[in-house]
Amino acid sequence: MFKRVSLMTLTLVTAVGCILVAALHPTGPNTVSYDEPIGVWLSIGMTVLLFIPLLVLSFFSNRIVRIISSIIQIPVVISFLGIIPISFFFSKSTGMGLLALFGMIVSIASIVVTLRSGRSREIAS
């Protein structure tokens, strides 16, 4: 359980970090920018709000709950995967691209740990 919760927390921190770095390098008038702090806070709030179900599901060890949690985590991986080329080609921000790459790796590790946890208990019983 500790691994799942810590990986989900690390993924959340990485997602918030991506928002903060994206606010440093706005690409247009309709993107997140520190010029409008309410937009930054709304983006961070929505991200945290979307991660709350994943954090709650990471506390449970039931197989069905772990499968549901891993299915819900797939769009997070796809989002980080989409941020990588956008950050390199459009905003010229290598820091955001590297942070998104780190977030994708942590998200994939979180899915693997979520699906693999509890295997030793199931095999032993």
Image (tube, rainbow, N blue to C red):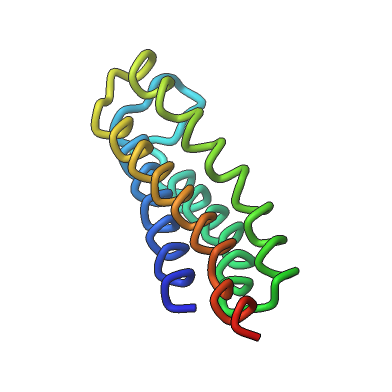
Q: Is residue 91 visible?
A: yes
Q: Quadrant of residue 52?
A: bottom right
- Depth order, front residue of 99/1: 1
Instruction: Residue lying at the far front in this picture: please name it.
Output: 124
Q: Quadrant of residue 66?
A: bottom right
Instruction: Residue lying at the far top in this picture: please name it.
Output: 89
In this picture, is 98 found above or below 12? above
- Depth order, front residue of 75/60: 60
Identity of the residue drawn at 55% across and 69% down: 55
User: Where residue 125 appears, x then y in whole percent?
Assistant: 66, 86
Identity of the residue drawn at 42% across and 20% down: 85
User: Where residue 3 appears, x then y in whole percent?
Assistant: 42, 71
Q: Quadrant of residue 50?
A: bottom right
- Depth order, front residue of 97/31: 97
Identity of the residue drawn at 66% across and 53% down: 72
Left or right of residue 123: residue 109: left
- Depth order, front residue of 125/29: 125
Instruction: Residue lying at the far left in this picture: please name it.
Output: 95
In this picture, is 32 found above or below 42? above
User: Where residue 61 appears, x then y in whole percent?
Assistant: 62, 78
Q: How many marks?
A: 0
User: Where residue 25 appears, x then y in whole percent?
Assistant: 31, 28
Instruction: Residue lying at the far right in this picture: please name it.
Output: 64
Left or right of residue 52: residue 40: left
Identity of the residue drawn at 60% across and 52% down: 73
Q: Is residue 60 visible?
A: no
In this picture, is 34 found above or below 117? above
